Amino acid sequence: MLYPVAQSRAAAVNRKVLRFARERWFALLTERRLRPGVHRSTKELKAAIHDFIENHNRDPKPFIWHKTADQILDSVARFCK
């Protein structure tokens, strides 16, 4: 059983992990579908986004963490000093 401090730290780490995953997904969308193309209308932009989502979901690959949450948070803390 986790103590309240550990639970709140675990919840904070989980929120940061989910936020990173969302940011990374939007970065991929931008790099692979939005930035390379020139969209002349909102309709073309929507179509490009939907096309990316369909292709991405055909062969999804999970993000593999190579560091623990504590290592990532320590790195961020060093960066912010």
Image: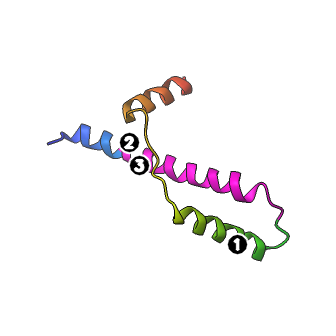
Look at the image and name its color scheme: rainbow
Q: Which mark is residue 13?
A: 2
Residue under label 1: 46
Give the percent coordinates (x, y) of residue 73: 43, 32
Q: Which residues are magenta?
A: 12-38
Element on which disc 1 rests: helix
Magenta stretch containing residue 60, yes or no?
Answer: no
Q: Are marks 3 and 1 in contact (CB under 8 Å)?
A: no
Query: Going 33% across and 46% down the picture, which residue do you hit?
Result: 11
Query: Going 14% across and 42% down the picture, which residue do you hit?
Result: 1
Left or right of 49 in this view: 6 = left
Left or right of 13 in this view: 24 = right
Q: Earlier in the sequence, mark 3 or mark 1?
A: 3
Please tell me which residue lies in front, 72 or 33.
33
Q: Which mark is residue 15?
A: 3
Q: CA distance from mark 2 to mark 1?
A: 33 Å
Residue type marked 2: Val
Q: CA distance from mark 3 to mark 1?
A: 28 Å
Q: Are marks 3 and 2 in contact (CB under 8 Å)?
A: yes
Query: Going 53% across and 66% down the picture, which residue do you hit?
Result: 58
Q: Earlier in the sequence, mark 2 or mark 1?
A: 2
